């Protein structure tokens, strides 16, 4: 059959990508403590154990706080950057936008170590605030890209029309631009949230004694007894990521439909 | 009342009207680019005024300057006698219809039209009535609840008009408002815009690169080239008596023939034109040539002369020639005619284009047949 090789390749590729993830829920509901086939029986005890674990809950709380704060910060800064880059001309615009995008390609370990060195030499106490700072930094490029696309799709005369009709520059932004880029803002928030939630290296270096979910999971991997619980936690995280990305994509598409723009491709 | 008489009456009224917009010595630079080079312009109250010119001539810049979207380096803009310096766009008594219409896609038609009334102290019901009235005026009665992103081009244009007119501005600025519409829709909107302007009595300033559109709609037209106004006149005067070759070329088609100026006469200028012979051009038809033009020339519109069929009585003077080319357009036929003696000037044959309306009973002539061309000195324009 024509294209049979390509089909086999595609199937292998997808299996390699997603089969390990499918294993997560399977073992999360397996009553055996050893992560191996054959499966023993169905149980939800690992999920119960997970919710009863105080340090896990603390890690989850920390992670959520960090993810919410850094996604909000990154998105706010992203709005400024996107608006500046799409609406105004200023000296050294290219290099400035390039610097904003740089964390995308810089090795995270380098970013983490540099931040650690700077923060320690400034005498800053390491806690979740420092993680928020680091996560805002790495989420900024994603937020900027998403928001620049959103701002770029707007007709510049929309704002002028609102201004012409008697609004101030700020109210024109609030009444016309903000509602139209809202889908972009929501996708940016969700994207940044997802990135921050599973980020390990920065959290590992900058959190001090505070655990986040990824660092907590890493620390628990040393104890075989805990592994089924980690599987349960992983299942929950995967589920959450899928839900968030779906919501982000929904808002992105709704925004495109609303403004009648062309779909130029998204994350899903 | 026919359209032409109402147009004439309207022009007579506006000709005596007070100035609504006065531009004095306006200069505008974008970096090294000199966009407006000393614009002096008076637009009268109640007038349908057009800024016409090729792209990059500064017409949109001038419109945006009047609206307050662009700063000027020097000069004065008065709107209804008030100096607009330091007055931002949101406080000027002007509203604009944008080229893209700039309909707010997240709002309904009614919300779009009522957008400018947000700061209006009137009650909600009164505002809703005003919106409905504005929609009715542009022929969109009952469209208020529709989503604006689903409207057609013509409907968006109407919403943009209603949205601007609801604020009862002293001046409505229109930036190429018809360029996005197809031909049929454009012609329909031209008529509607004229009617609307007569109805509301607001001064309209239209920017367009389409000479036909400007001729159809305007009371007066300013033709712009390179940031300057080349000619400001009514449509008929602009078409019949362009004051420069550049304007003549931009508006419609004009034939040009080289001319020898023989001398001034009490009523005009006597010239020798190959193919036409000695002609006395009336002084009203004498213009100055643009720098860079090669010598004096006479020009005439393709329909300003006509071909005389066999047995027809000719009016005015007659010149004979041979038909070089025939282009049939259905309602019109264009003939390129090589006039006898037209090559006498420098040996170059210069066929002239003659437009004839295809009326019943008149046959389309063949290439190569001889033709009699009837003309009068009043239909020639001299660029000396």
Image (cartoon, coloured by chain):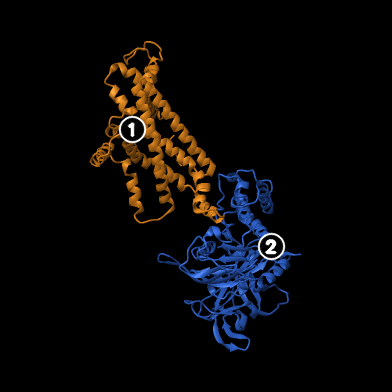
Chain colours: A orange, B blue
For the residues bearing labels 1 and 2, Cβ distance under 8 angstroms: no
Q: In this orientation, which residue lies closer to the viewer: B46 or B153?
A: B46
The C terminus of chain A sits in image quarter = top left
Q: Residue furthest top?
A: A40
- Helix, strand or loop for disc 1: loop
* C-alpha span from label 1 to label 2: 66 Å
Q: Residues within 10 Å of mark 1 (few under 14, many from 20)?
A: many
1 or 2: mark nearer the eye: 1
**Same subunit, tags 1 and 2:** no
Residue A19 falls left or right of residue B54: left
- Residue highlighted by disc 2: B198
User: Relative to A241, is B59 above or below?
Assistant: below
- The subunit carrying tag 2 is B
Counting from the top left corner in percent of width and height, residue A135 is at 34, 37
Q: Residues within 10 Å of mark 2 (few under 14, many from 20)?
A: some
Q: Residue at x 66, y 72 (%)?
A: B15
Residue B241 falls left or right of residue A262: right
Counting from the top left corner in percent of width and height, residue B200 is at 68, 60
């Amino acid at each position: 059959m024509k294209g049979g090789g390509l089909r086999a390749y595609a199937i292998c590729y997808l299996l390699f990508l997603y089969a390990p993830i499918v294993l997560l829920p399977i073992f999360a509901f397996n009553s055996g403590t050893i992560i191996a086939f054959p499966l023993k029986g169905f149980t939800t005890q690992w999920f119960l154990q997970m919710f009863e674990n105080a340090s896990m809950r603390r890690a989850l709380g920390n992670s959520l706080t960090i993810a919410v704060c850094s996604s909000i910060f990154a998105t706010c800064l992203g709005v400024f950057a996107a608006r500046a880059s799409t609406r105004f001309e200023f000296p050294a615009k290219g290099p400035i936008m390039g610097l904003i995008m740089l964390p995308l390609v810089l090795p995270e370990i380098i970013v983490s170590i540099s931040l650690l060195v700077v923060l320690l030499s400034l005498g800053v106490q390491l806690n979740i605030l420092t993680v928020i700072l680091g996560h805002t930094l790495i989420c900024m490029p994603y937020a900027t890209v998403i928001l620049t696309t959103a701002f770029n799709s707007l007709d510049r005369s929309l704002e002028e029309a609102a201004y012409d009709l008697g609004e101030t520059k700020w109210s024109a932004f609030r009444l016309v631009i903000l509602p139209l880029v809202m889908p972009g803002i929501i996708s940016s928030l969700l994207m940044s949230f997802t990135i921050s939630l599973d980020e390990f290296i920065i959290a590992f270096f900058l959190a001090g004694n505070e655990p986040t979910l990824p660092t907590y999971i890493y620390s628990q991997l040393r104890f075989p007894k805990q592994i089924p619980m980690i599987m349960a936690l992983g299942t929950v995280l995967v589920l959450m990521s899928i839900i968030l990305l779906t919501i982000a994509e929904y808002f992105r598409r709704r925004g495109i439909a609303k403004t009648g723009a062309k779909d130029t491709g998204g994350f899903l | 009342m026919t359209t032409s008489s109402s147009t004439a009456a309207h022009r007579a009224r506006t000709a005596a009207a007070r100035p609504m917009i006065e531009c004095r010595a306006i200069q505008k630079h974008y970096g090294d680019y000199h966009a407006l080079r000393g614009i002096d312009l008076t637009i009268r109250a109640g007038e349908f005024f057009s800024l016409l010119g090729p792209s990059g001539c500064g017409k949109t810049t001038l419109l945006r300057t009047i609206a307050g979207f662009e700063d000027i380096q020097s000069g004065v803009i008065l709107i209804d006698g008030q100096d607009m310096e330091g007055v931002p766009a949101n406080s000027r008594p002007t509203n604009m219809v944008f080229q893209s219409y700039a309909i707010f896609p997240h709002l309904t038609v009614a919300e779009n039209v009522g957008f400018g009334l947000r700061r209006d102290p009137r009650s909600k019901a009164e505002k809703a009535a005003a919106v409905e009235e504005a929609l009715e005026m542009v022929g969109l009665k009952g469209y208020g609840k529709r989503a604006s992103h689903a409207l057609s081009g013509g409907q968006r244009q109407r919403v943009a008009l209603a949205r601007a007119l609801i604020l009862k501005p002293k001046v409505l600025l229109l930036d190429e408002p018809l360029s996005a519409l197809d031909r049929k829709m454009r012609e329909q909107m031209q008529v509607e815009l004229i009617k609307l302007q007569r109805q509301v009595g607001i001064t309209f300033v239209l920017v367009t690169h389409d000479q036909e559109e400007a001729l159809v709609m305007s009371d007066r037209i300013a033709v712009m080239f390179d940031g300057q106004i080349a000619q400001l006149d009514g449509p008929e005067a602009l078409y019949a008596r362009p004051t420069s070759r550049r304007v003549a070329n931009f508006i419609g088609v004009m034939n040009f023939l080289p001319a020898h100026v023989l001398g001034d006469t009490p009523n005009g200028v006597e010239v020798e034109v190959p193919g036409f012979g000695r002609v006395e051009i009336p002084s009203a038809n004498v213009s100055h040539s643009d720098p860079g033009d090669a010598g004096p020339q006479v020009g005439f519109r393709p329909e300003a002369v006509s071909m005389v069929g066999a047995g027809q009585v000719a009016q005015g003077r007659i010149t004979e020639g041979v038909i070089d080319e025939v282009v049939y357009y259905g309602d019109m036929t264009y003939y390129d005619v090589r006039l006898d003696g037209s090559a006498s000037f420098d040996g170059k044959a210069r066929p002239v284009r003659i437009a004839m309306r295809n009326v019943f009973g008149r046959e389309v002539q063949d290439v190569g047949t001889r033709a009699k061309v009837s003309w009068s000195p009043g239909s020639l324009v001299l660029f000396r």
